[in-house]
Amino acid sequence: MRPSQSARQSVPRADVVVIGAGLAGLSCAAELAEAGASVFVAAKGLATTHWTHGGLDVAAPAAARTSRDGIARLARTDGHPYSRLARDADAAVSRHLVRVGAAGLDHAGSLATALAPFPTAIGALRRAAIVPLAQAAALEPWRVTGLVLVGIRGFPDAWPEYAARNLENAAWPDGPSGIRAVEVAVPGVERLRNVGSQDLARLFDDPAWRGRALAAIAAALPPGDWRVGMPAVLGVEHHAAAHADAEAAFGRRVFEVPSLPPSVPGMRLFDALRRRILASAGRVQIGFDVVSVEREGRHVIAIHTEAASRTLRLAANAFVLATGGIAGAGIRALPDGGLVERVFGLPVVGPEQASWFSDDPLMPHPLEAAGIEVDEQLAPAGLENVRVIGSALAGMRYLDERCGDGVALASAHRAARSLGAPRAVAA
Amino acid sequence: MSARAEVDVVVVGGGATGAGALRDLAMRGLRALLVERGDFTSGTSGRYHGLLHSGARYVESDPVSARHCAEENAVLRHIAPATIEPTGGYFVATPDDPDDYLDRFPAACVAAGIEVESMPLDDLFRAEPLLSREIRAAYRVPDASLEPWELVDANLASAREYGADAWRYHEVIGFERSSGGAVVAVRVRDLHGGDQRTVACRAVVSAAGAWAGKVAALAGAQLEMRPGKGSMLILNRRLTTAVVNRLAPPGDGDILVPVHTVCILGTTDITVPDPDDVHVTRDEVEALLADGERLVPGISGARVLRAYAGSRPLYDAGELDRTAGHDESREISRAHHVIDHGDRDGVDGMWSIVGGKLTTYRLMARDVVDAVAAALGVDAPCRTADEPLPAPATGTPYWLGDRLAAHEAEGGGNAELVCECELVTRRRLEHALDERGDSTLDDLRRTTRLGMGPCQGAFCTPRAAALIDARRPGAANAPMRGFLAERYRGTRPIAWGDQLAELWLTAGIYRGTLAVHALRDAALAVGEAERAAS
C-alpha cells in the first residue's frame, strides 16, 4: 500500500538508506559512503553511543585473554553473531580505528592487546583493550606509579573518594602503587547551574578556560609519581588538545574515567563518524522516525519518516536496519510478552516472557539475547534488500560478553560488503 | 549486654497508627516509646495508594468504616493540612457497574455523613478529559491525596515535643511477663548495632498492622491476622486531576489517585499467608490495567514506572466474634478493633489495634489509647483531633514547585541536584544524613523522594551512595546494591515498552560503564588477604 503523495517530500533516491545512528549504523554508512555509494542515515534519535563509556568493547567474555581470543570463544557459541561474523572482525575494527583516527579520534590497542582492568567511576574494574587515547593511560603497566582520581566540585558524577576506597579493595593485579582522591574547586564552575558532563566538556573546549582549570587542578595534585584519572569531560570538539594540555599542565599521564550519561567520549565517537560520512557526501538526519514502509514482494522500495511536521519519502536500492535492540528501542517489548521490530515488523526471537529476567538486576537477563535472525549476508527472512546489523541481531549478551561494539563493527562491515561497497581504500 | 530503659507504654510499629498512638499517649502525659523493626512508614502506611478516603468507598459494604472515614477526613484536614492535596474525588459509573448500586449510592453517602454532589457529565469530561466517554453517571465527594511519610513524621515530631521517643530499626524479640501474666518489659534488638535492650513498661500497644499476629505470639497471645496484599501501579504522570473511583463494590483496578507528579492505579486484594510477601505478579498487573481501561481508555499504553504492594491489616473477624462476643462481624470487617489481650489471652497490659484504614489512623490510635489510659488510671482526654500537627519545613510537600523554589533559593539554583526527577539537592540529602546518620538509600527515599521519578534511581543511586560513603567510609556498597534490588523489584513486573528500554539503559550504566557487579567490599578484600596470608 502506498500512502498518498500529498503532504510529503521526496529526497533524491539513495543507494542505501541506513536506519539508526549508533556505532553500527554510522560505521556501515561511512564504509558505504567512502566506497562511493550515496548514503542517507535516518535515525529516530541519538543512539546508545551517548550512554556508554566510549571504549570499544569487542569481546571480553570471562577467561578471554585478548579481544581476538574473546571473539574465537564467542564464535563457538551457537547462534552468537560472532559465529558468523568472526572473520570480519579484524578488518572491521582496524578500518574503524583508521576511520575515526582520520577524524581526530585516535585509539590505543588492537585485537591482539591483552585485556586489562580499567578502573570505573565507582571504583570497580572492568576489562578493556581498545580505548580512545584519552583513556589509554589507564591500561598501561602501573609498576611503581600511583593513581590519583580527580573530582571537580559541583560536578555530581565523579566520586573520587568513594571510587578510591573501592579500588583499594579491588583485586587489581599489578595495579597502581597507591590510590588517592582529590576534589578541586575549578574557577567558573560555580556559575553553572547543575553542572553536567557536557557543560564541563564545552568549557574544556575553550583554551583560555582550560588553562585556568588545569592550573587549578595541577596545584591540587600530590607530588610524586602519579597517573591522573579525570572525569571524562576533557573537551568535545577539541578533546585531543584538551588531553594533551592536561598532560602538559600536570606533567603526568592523564586518562579519563567515564561515568553517568551523557557520555562525552560517546559524543566524540558520534561526531567523528558523522564527519567521515559527511566528508564522503553522505547525509545524517536525526529526529527522523520511520512511520511506514513501501514494499513490493521481497523488496523494500522506500521508507517514510516523520520529522518537523512533514513526511519524507526515502527510496533506495537497499536498507540497513541499525535501530538497536531493546535499549535502543529498535525492538519493543509488549505487555503480553510479544517482541516487535519497529520498522519492518521482522520476527524477533527471544525467550518466553516468564524467563525474561534474572532475579538479580546486576546479573545477565535471558531477554538480552533477543533479536532478529539473519542469513550469511545479514538479510532477515523475507526481505532481500535489507540488512540487519548491530544490537538488533539475536544471540548475544553484550553486557556480559562485552562484545556489542565489535559485533556492531563486524556486522556493519559485512553488510557494507554485501551491498556492494568495494574494498575501500583506508583513509 | 542488655541496656535497660523504662517507660509507661511501649508502642510496637512505626506506621501511621503507631505514630498516632505515640503522640496521643504523650499528649496525655504518659511516657511512651515507639519501636519499629524497619524505617518509619516502611510497612503498609508507606505502601498504600495515597488516598484520603471520603468514606464513600465503603457506604455499602462497610457503613461503620464509611462513617469513621468521613469524620476523620474532616479532622485530618484540620490537623494536617500540609499533608493533604485537596484534589477532590469522583465516583463514576461505567456501563459495567450495577444500576442498583448507582441508585442507592447518594442516599447511602448522606446517611454516612459524606458530602455528595451529582456531577453533570459535561462538567466531568471538561475537568477530566481522559476519562472514558462511556461513563454514564458521576458524583463528587471529598476524597483527597494524602502524603503518608509527612504525616507519620509530623506525628513523631509532635510526640517527641511531648517527651516521647521513637526508635527505628529496633525489632521486638520478646516480652517479659510477671508471675501473674502481665507484660512488664519488651525486649528489642537494634538491627543496625546488634545490641539488645530491655524496656520496662506498664503497658504495650501493638500497632503492627498486618504483623500484629506475630507480635502477639511473642507475648503468648493469640491473634489471627489475614493479611490482604494490595498491589498498585504508578503511572508516570497525572492522568486525572482528582481521585476517580468506580461506582461499584470494591474491585481490582477501580481507583486512580493523583499523587505528586504521578498517579496510582489500585488495588488488588489477595489474601497472603505472610505479610512480608509484597511481590507483584504479572497477573495482578494485567488485571489492574484491564480494569483501569474502563476508567481511562488507553491506560495500558501509558508508561508504568513501577508496581508495588502493601499488606492490609485485616483480621479474622470470625475469631473476634468468638472471643469478643461481637455479633456484627461483617459490619466491622474493615473497621478497626481494639483487642485487650488481658481479657482474651490472660496477657494483661497488652492491647492490639487491628483493621482500619490509613485515613482513620488517628481514631484507631485514640481508641486504643483510651483503653490503655483507663487501665493505667489516666483520665486526661484525647486532644489529637484539636491540636494541629507541626507543619513541614517546605510548604506543600506534594507540590514539586515548592522543591523547585527551595532549589532556586539555594545559591540561585546552583545547588547540586542529586535526583533530577524529584529535585532532591545534595544539601537536602546531607541534611537527611545529619538527622539520621545510619540511613540506607531506601530510608533517604522515604525522607526525600530520592529515586522515585521516571528513571527510578538510575542516576541518583551512585551519587547518593558516594555521600553515604563520605560519612561512613566503606559502608555504601551494600545499601547501593540493596536500593538497586529494591527499585528493580518494582520495575520488573511492569518491564515492557519504554520502561523496559529504561531498565536496559540502566543495566548498561551499572553493568557496562560502572561494573557495579564487580565491586568488592572491604570485608571481602580483607577475608581474601587473610586467606592468602595463612
Image: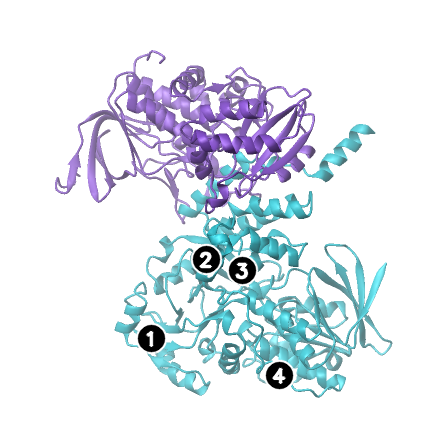
Chain colours: A purple, B cyan
Residue drawn 49% across and 51% down? B493
Q: Kindly report the distance in space between the C-alpha atoms of the residues bearing marks 4 and 2.
A: 36 Å
The circle on residue B138 is: 1
Q: Nearer the viewer, mark 4 or mark 2?
A: 2
Please state which amino acid type lies under the numbered disc 1: Ala
Q: Which residue is mark 3?
A: B309
Q: Kindly report the distance in space between the C-alpha atoms of the residues bearing marks 2 and 1.
A: 35 Å
Q: Nearer the viewer, mark 2 or mark 1?
A: 2
> What subunit carries mark 1?
B
The circle on residue B383 is: 4
The circle on residue A381 is: none
Image quarter where the N terminus of chain A lies is top left
Q: Earlier in the sequence, mark 2 or mark 1?
A: 1
Residue drawn 80% across and 60% down? B196
Please state which amino acid type lies under the numbered disc 3: Ala
Kindly state the secondary structure of the residue where label 3 is placed: strand
